[in-house]
């Protein structure tokens, strides 16, 4: 066989979340420190494919990315069909912890983007001992809304088109066109109301203002990185959040927006490589 | 009168004149007519709206994705379904070949208070990428001699 086959392996794991079995699709590659990656609202784990195939990172990290229930190739739980999907701080946290437990991951690193970045802060607040490091991309304790999410799921507006069109402006213009297109393609493929349901966590339920000061980075190091073109979670939002957490590290990434790992993988690599090196050094790996 | 954006308010280092911004806006129908793919994306759109710089809005009539009329406002008793108006410095910054962060998207401009969106937003939201791309056309056509 001469065709190029990527080293990523995808499988399904059955995970019990809040009393119900969820069939969760995940992809992985590499060995070493487990590194669990969380996709943005309304998209799926394909956003992480460049990190998953990075030859250097996967020498030292077992990189794992999963589709949240209702996203990508992870279907809704059986009881979920016909109901309105709403992600909450509690359900999101439970999903991540259950997934890590199902795979028997030993104090994984968790890196999340956008809603994934927000929930990483909640993991740092309530479950720091379970993780060896936490990385929040486009993460803040709160950010100001800039559109009405009611537009995301209504019969007279194409959900895929409007979701992609709304987030298109969050991508920095410097990225390769194909990577920018691929990032938006994920948004065009989301299920009806799923982006909106994720944003219930982001906009309504997951306001962490006043809680992040309790984060102890000596227990679990916390890295925050935000793209300069992200006007949803702005660099100022991240810097304000980091300023309230003693010892948290914050970086503003140039020429990147809200989807650094997928919109411009090479540029993102420049910023995430030192973070992963630091985590390796702390863990003697 | 030539003014820099920074002279008007804290903004990007973009030099412009109101006249240049208004003139660029007048050319958008021609730019659009030459872009078959963009016209096709708007093929189901018929709307009359108010678009442009705050100093000189335009009544814009769109039929099947083509701008069939663009007339400086005000026009006596002319109706419009929605409006998107931005400051001249916002348009000048938006039309740069590589716009600065925060000046690179129609909705980043509304968030930072450089643009206002009002009226019945359904046609705008249902064709959001179309409007973003139509209103970005002067960027591709060398606004300010940049291209």
Image (cartoon, coloured by chain):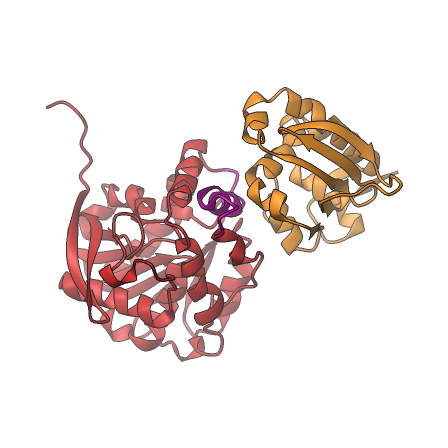
Chain colours: A red, B orange
Rendered residue at 19%/48% (across/down)? A28
| Image quadrant occupied by the N terminus of chain A | top left
Question: In this orientation, does residue B100 appear?
Answer: no
Q: Position of residue B127 (x, y in %)?
A: 57, 39
Image position, residue A236 (x, y; %): 55, 61
From the viewer's side, name the closer residue of B106 and A242.
B106
Q: Is residue A231 magenta?
A: no
Q: Residue at x 57, y 21 (%)?
A: B36
Decide: is A62 above or below A119.
Answer: above
Q: Which residues are magenta?
A: A154-174
Horizontal side, residue B49 vs residue A127: left or right: right
Residue A160 belongs to magenta span: yes
| Residue A263 visible at all | yes
Spot occupied by residue B35 in the image (x, y as percentages of width and height): 60, 22
Q: Which sits in the foreground, A136 or A222?
A: A136
Can you tell which quarter of the image residue A107 is in?
bottom left
Name which quarter of the figure residue B55 lies in: top right
Q: Quadrant of the C terminus of chain A?
A: bottom left
| Above or below: residue B145 compared with residue A105 | above
Q: How many marks?
A: 0
């Amino acid at each position: 066989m001469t065709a190029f086959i990527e080293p990523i392996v995808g499988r399904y794991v059955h995970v019990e979340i809040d009393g119900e079995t969820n069939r969760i699709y995940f992809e992985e590659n590499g060995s070493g420190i487990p590194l669990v990656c969380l996709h943005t609202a309304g998209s799926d784990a394909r956003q992480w494919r460049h990190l998953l195939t990075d030859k250097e990172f996967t020498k030292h990290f077992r990189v794992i990315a999963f589709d949240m229930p209702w996203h990508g190739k992870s279907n809704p739980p059986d009881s979920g069909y016909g109901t309105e999907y709403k992600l909450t701080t509690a359900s999101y946290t439970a999903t991540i912890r259950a997934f890590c437990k199902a795979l028997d991951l030993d104090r994984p690193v968790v890196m999340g983007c956008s809603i994934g970045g927000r929930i990483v802060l909640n993991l740092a607040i309530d479950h720091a001992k379970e993780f060896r490091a936490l990385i929040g991309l486009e993460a803040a304790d709160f950010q100001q809304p800039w559109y009405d999410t009611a537009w995301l799921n209504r019969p007279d507006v194409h959900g895929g088109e409007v979701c992609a069109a709304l987030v298109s402006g969050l991508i920095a213009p410097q990225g390769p066109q194909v990577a920018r297109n691929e990032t938006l393609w994920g948004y065009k493929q989301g299920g009806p109301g799923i982006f909106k349901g994720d944003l219930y966590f982001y906009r309504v339920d997951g306001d962490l203002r006043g809680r992040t000061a309790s984060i102890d980075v000596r227990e679990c190091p916390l890295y925050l990185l935000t793209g300069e073109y992200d006007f949803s979670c702005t660099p100022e939002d991240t810097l304000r959040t980091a300023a309230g957490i003693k010892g948290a590290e914050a970086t503003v990434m140039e020429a990147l927006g809200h989807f650094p790992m997928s919109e411009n993988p090479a540029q993102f690599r420049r910023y995430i490589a030192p973070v992963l090196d630091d985590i390796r050094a702390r863990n003697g790996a | 009168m030539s003014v820099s954006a920074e002279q008007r308010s804290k903004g990007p280092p973009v030099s412009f004149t109101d006249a240049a911004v208004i003139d660029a806006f007048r050319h958008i129908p021609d730019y659009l007519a030459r872009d078959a793919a963009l016209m096709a994306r708007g093929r189901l759109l018929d709307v009359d709206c108010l678009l442009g710089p705050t100093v000189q809005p335009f009544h814009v009539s769109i039929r099947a994705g083509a701008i069939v009329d663009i007339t400086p406002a005000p026009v006596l008793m002319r109706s419009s379904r929605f409006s998107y108006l931005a400051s001249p410095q916002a348009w000048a910054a938006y039309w740069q070949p590589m716009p600065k962060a925060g000046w690179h998207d129609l909705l980043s401009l509304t968030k930072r208070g450089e643009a206002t969106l009002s009226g019945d937003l359904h046609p705008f939201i249902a064709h959001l990428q179309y409007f973003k791309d139509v209103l970005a056309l002067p960027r591709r056509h060398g606004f300010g001699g940049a291209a």
